[in-house]
Image (tube, helix red, strand yellow):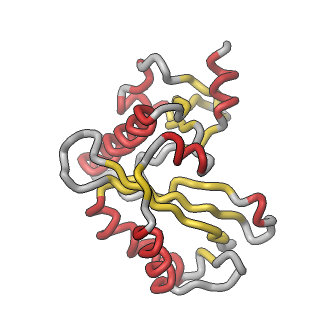
Amino acid sequence: MNPSILHAMQVLTADDPRGESSQPVIVVLTRISEPSQHSSKARWTLAFIGPLQEFHQSFIHRMARDFDKGAYLDRFHRSIRGGDFTRTLNRSIERAQSLTANTLRRHGVGAVTWSEEEATATGIKDLPMVVQVPFFMDNRYGFEIKTDEDAQRLLLCTLNLKRLAKQSGKCDPLYTGRPMLEQPARLKAASAH
């Protein structure tokens, strides 16, 4: 497996949109590329979305272990130990910003989609702003991140999918529910048909 190059990290925080917890929801954005790509080709990804407790108990440890195994390199293509990643993450936490649509768009998150199964499970297929987008052999469903309400909807869908995964016990809820990033233009084109 080729390692990914970690160029940057941004931590965002938000209140739990379900109102189930007084602890914040954490969103971790990472800017990554492949070793053969120029840094200008690096793209932002949603590395983690979930409750603070899951962030501390699972995400940090799993990512540190991945760094120890060489799954990621720093922007200078050097190996990073898990402890170094944790220190970098702690600095990102100190600079955490509130989750807003503007912040997401600034980091390349202009639209998101989920699989048809996930969209059905969360009930978003019936929402007026949700667009069906053809994707290989099936369809994905999603929406543009235009407003802060859209950013909250992103959290709500992800947290609901995590809850369903935890209840079913069939998959690891740590990475469950994260949407695929989509180009807003693809959603606009799909909605025009």
Up the image or down, 142 lies above or below 180; here it is above
Horizontally, is 141 left or right of 21 in the view? Answer: right
Percent x, y of residue 153: 39, 35
For this rendering, which residue is in front, 169 or 125?
A: 125
State whether residue 84 is above or below residue 18. below
Residue 5 at least partly seen: yes
Is any atom of residue 1 visible in this view? no
Q: In percent of the image, x 71 and y 80: which residue is there?
A: 77
- Left or right placement of residue 80 versus residue 149 in this view: right
Q: Position of residue 113 (x, y in %)?
A: 53, 36
Residue 91, position as x, y percentages in the image: 46, 74
Q: Nearer the viewer, residue 138 or 34?
A: 34
In the rendered image, residue 140, in percent from the top left (x then y), is placed at 55, 31
Looking at the figure, which quarter contains the N terminus? bottom right
Q: Residue at x 19, y 50 (%)?
A: 21
153 horizontally vs 15: left or right: right
The quarter of the picture where residue 193 lies is: top right
Residue at the spot 59% in from the left edge and 81% down from the top edge: 70
Please indicate whether residue 87 sits to the left or right of residue 4 in the image.
left
Q: Quadrant of residue 171?
A: bottom left
**Residue 119 lies in quadrant:** top left
Q: Disc count in the image?
A: 0
Judge by depth and name the residue closer to the eye, 179 or 76.
76
